[in-house]
Amino acid sequence: MDLNLKVNVIPALTYNKLQLNGSSINENGIDITSVGTPDPERLPQGVDIRTGVDTEEAESIFACYREKMLKADEGLPKPNGDQSYRNDNQSTRTGMGIEVDELLDKAGVRSDVYYVAEDVKIDEPLVLHYELSDGDGSLSRQIIHLKENSELTVVMFYESDEEAAGFQGVSTKVLVEKNAKLKLFKIQKLGNKFLHFDDFGGVVDDNGKVEIVQIELGAIKNWNGVHITLFGKEASFLDNTGYLCVGEQQYDMNYIAEHRGKKTVSDMYFRGVLEGSAQKVFRDTLDFKSGCSGAKGNEQEDTLLLTPEVVNRSMPIILCQEEDVDGTHGATIGQLSEDVLFYMNSRGIDDEEAKKLMVRARLESLVKMIPDGATAGKMQYFVQNMNA
């Protein structure tokens, strides 16, 4: 299979010379050896699973929300350079965009559906563990549907041997109904010759909550996209993303928080490290739609640059059709300060060990959030023994 995809396109174009309007996946000779999501290691009581569901049928749960949004947008002015039309035919918008859906359709990838009934609150995490080998090519798509007043935690862990090569693509879409709560952990530790993409889209209704923790450590090329639609009143979204990008790794990401309901809240935090000749592209959009009065959006990026050869490009964006909103973004990007190094040196810690301590601290703060003991243990071991 040859891949030629336009992905991670921002909602409104900026200057082309910045090379941040979108990204491409151009890879030839991809061998897909498996489609579908691995069976859970243990199925928590209260989670209903249907595998291999026709995707049109599985995604029909989004239809009423999509129709309401399209109707609400009728006649409203679009921002200059509007690109949202590209994904108008998606059942629910995702960060990477419609061409990922088209790829999965072409490859015959059906949906695995995870459903939690109304008023069911599940404490035990649902763990989906991808164990990939050298030469593997994997595609999968999931639909997670939480009915009113339900709660679920999902852990998705992708791993392989350190020197393994291969390909993995994942698409996850969620519907979180009124007063429901979803916590989603995505941890990627694939081999250093893997290609990987992870696409996410979701709709959150009144007072629903979605929390995502993403940790990206492996693969030579990574593409990540997240689009959350805060549809209902007081719906909220919290994202904590951490990454380690070293050597010749490339990491391309696109995050969009779309506020539609009144008093909706989004908070997104990104902590990462670049070393060697690594390259990272970061796009983040707070999109305040008409009718979302009282909404608040916040994005903060903290990137540590350990070598002068790294390439870091960031594009925070705020789009606004509503007056009574509060959108903020901030970035701290740079090397370790001389003050920090002096403090470490004065306590017998040389520059190299000081860098390792700072890298570990950034990643450990996220690893400690992982609710699955086996996954957390593997990640803790990796962070403690990494060379960066």
Image: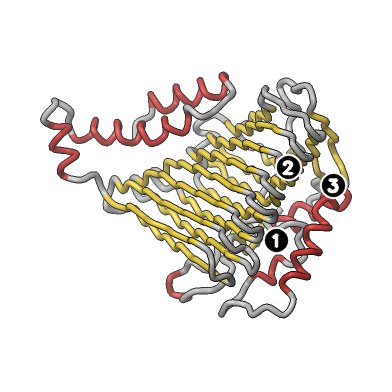
Residue 348: horizontal and vertical position, in percent?
A: 14, 25
Q: Can you tell which of label 3 and label 1 is closer to the viewer?
A: 3
- Please give the residue where the numbered disc 3 appears in the rendered image: 58
Residue 290: horizontal and vertical position, in percent?
A: 64, 69
Sequence-first tag of 2 and 1: 1
Q: Residue at x 33, y 52 (%)?
A: 332
Q: Residue at x 56, y 60 (%)?
A: 294
- Please give the residue where the numbered disc 1 appears in the rendered image: 99
Q: Residue at x 46, y 41 (%)?
A: 242
* Crowd tier of the residue under label 3, counting other residues whose Cα lies within 10 Å: few below 14, some 14–19, many 20 or above: some
Amino acid tagged 3 = Ala
Describe residue 243's horizontal placement relative to residue 206 as left or right: left
Sequence-first tag of 3 and 2: 3
- 170 or 337, which is in the foreground? 337
Q: CA distance from mark 3 to mark 2?
A: 14 Å
Q: Can you tell which of label 3 and label 2 is closer to the viewer?
A: 3
* Crowd tier of the residue under label 1, counting other residues whose Cα lies within 10 Å: few below 14, some 14–19, many 20 or above: some
Describe residue 177's horizontal placement relative to residue 285 as left or right: right
Numbered disc 2: secondary structure: strand
Q: Is residue 26 visible?
A: no
Rendered position, 115 above or below 141: above
Q: CA distance from mark 2 to mark 1?
A: 15 Å
Amino acid tagged 1 = Glu
Q: CA distance from mark 3 to mark 1?
A: 18 Å
Sequence-first tag of 3 and 1: 3
Q: Which mark is residue 140?
A: 2
